[in-house]
Structure formats: structure tokens, C-alpha cells
């Protein structure tokens, strides 16, 4: 750990061990306690499933809380310990939670629960890009190509919701958010 800090931040071991440094954080103590309690009330420390809570301040990107049902440590025989920041690890993000927000935006825009889309699997976005070109997703398992929003929600179809995001268009291209989101 010390070698990581000395290499990344350019600090000497003496500076790290000798005190006198001030560490500033954007963490909100009350929100951190609430996140810790929510995670541990859902999944105990040592549960083979990872319980993760991350709160980011919109507009600034400041991290307000990061909780997980693991203890940071090096003992590989202890399932409660990890050296991986699960809040930042690929595949450990909010995932399907965003489908609800996409559905809410679509409903606000006048799309109903019966709004049908037919998608390929994988589906390649016509609007959103990642580092390799246009963003693409596939479903986990076999899904019908044509779904309505209600069925896509309870089946958690990745391809449907990326196609729906494409229909809604880029957030950057919107002139205003619906009044309910202001």
C-alpha cells in the first residue's frame, strides 16, 4: 500500500509515516453511516454476494459515500476481506437500476408501458459512444426480440433499454428536463 501511495502521489515513506499530512475528503459522515447501515442490513460481512452503495453528488462528481460488505485487507483466506474497491470495479456498478430511470424519462416523454421495440442481441446504440465506438449491450440469457416496456422492465432487458435511450436521444441534446425533475 505504501509503495502505491509513494509511486502514485510522489510522497516518500517518511512523509507518509511521519504525520503532518492533511487528508481531505468529500465524504459526508451522515451519508456514509447510512450507506454502511443499508449495506450491512441487506448483506452481512462475509456474505459471498457483494453489497455495494455509492453516492455521488450530481454535477460535481464528488463522492459522498462508499460502502461495501467487505473489510479492506490482505487475508485471502478471509471471505470478508478484499483489496479490490468493489465500488469502482467493472461489473459492480448500478447496472439495471438505470432502467427504471430510463422508463421514467420515456413515460414523461409520452411513451406508455405498452411501447414496443424490436432489438437485435447484441444491440448497438446509434446515439451513445464509449471508448471503442458506439456503445453496445447484450442480454444475459435469451429474450424475445420484441418487448413492450412493462415486460422489458420485469425481464430486465438490456437491449430494450439501450434502444429506448436511443429513442429518447442524448441528454446533452435536450433543451430542458421535465419540470418534475427540476
Image: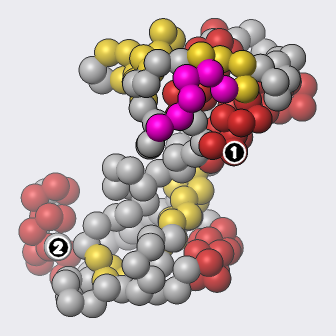
> Which residue is depicted at the point 42% across and 29% down?
137
> Which residue is depicted at the point 27% across and 20% down?
132
Picture layout, residue 173 above or below residue 154? above
Q: Is residue 131 left or right of residue 121?
A: left
Name the main secondary structure of what is drawn in magenta: loop
Q: Is residue 68 left or right of residue 10?
A: right
When asked about the image quadrant of residue 136, the answer is top left
The image's mark for residue 154 is 1
Nearest the viewer among 66 and 43 is 43
Residue 28 horizontal/vertical position (percent): 61, 66
Q: Give the residues drawn in magenta, as a range.
A: 142-147
Question: Is residue 171 at least partly visible in the picture?
Answer: no
Residue 159 horizontal/vertical position (percent): 52, 27
Between disc 2 and disc 1, whose residue precedes?
Answer: 2
| Quadrant for the N terminus in the image | bottom left
Say whether residue 75 is magenta. Answer: no
Q: Is disc 1 placed on a helix, strand or loop?
A: helix
- Mark 2 in CB contact with mark 1 (< 8 angstroms): no
> Which residue is depicted at the point 32% across and 15% down?
133
Picture layout, residue 122 above or below residue 85? above
For disc 1, the neighbor class at 10 Å (few under 14, some 14 to 19, many from 20) is: few
Q: Is disc 2 placed on a helix, strand or loop?
A: loop
Picture layout, residue 5 above or below residue 166? below
**Residue position for label 2:** 1
Amino acid at each position: 500500500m505504501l509503495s502505491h501511495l509513494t509511486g502514485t502521489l510522489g510522497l516518500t515513506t517518511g512523509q507518509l509515516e511521519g504525520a503532518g499530512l492533511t487528508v481531505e475528503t468529500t465524504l459526508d459522515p451522515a451519508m456514509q453511516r447510512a450507506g454502511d447501515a443499508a449495506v450491512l442490513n441487506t448483506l452481512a460481512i462475509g456474505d459471498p454476494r457483494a453489497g455495494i452503495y455509492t453516492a455521488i453528488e450530481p454535477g460535481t462528481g464528488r463522492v459522498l459515500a462508499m460502502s461495501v460488505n467487505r473489510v479492506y485487507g490482505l487475508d485471502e483466506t478471509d471471505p470478508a476481506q478484499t483489496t479490490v474497491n468493489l465500488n469502482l470495479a467493472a461489473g459492480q456498478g448500478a447496472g439495471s437500476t438505470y432502467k427504471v430511470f430510463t422508463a421514467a424519462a420515456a413515460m414523461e416523454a409520452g411513451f406508455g408501458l405498452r411501447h414496443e421495440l424490436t432489438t437485435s442481441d447484441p444491440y448497438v446504440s446509434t446515439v451513445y459512444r464509449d471508448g471503442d465506438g458506439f456503445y453496445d449491450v447484450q442480454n444475459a440469457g435469451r429474450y424475445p426480440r420484441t418487448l413492450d416496456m412493462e415486460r422489458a422492465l420485469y425481464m430486465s432487458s438490456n437491449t430494450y433499454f439501450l434502444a429506448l435511450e436511443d429513442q429518447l436521444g442524448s441528454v446533452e441534446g435536450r433543451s430542458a428536463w421535465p419540470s418534475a425533475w427540476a
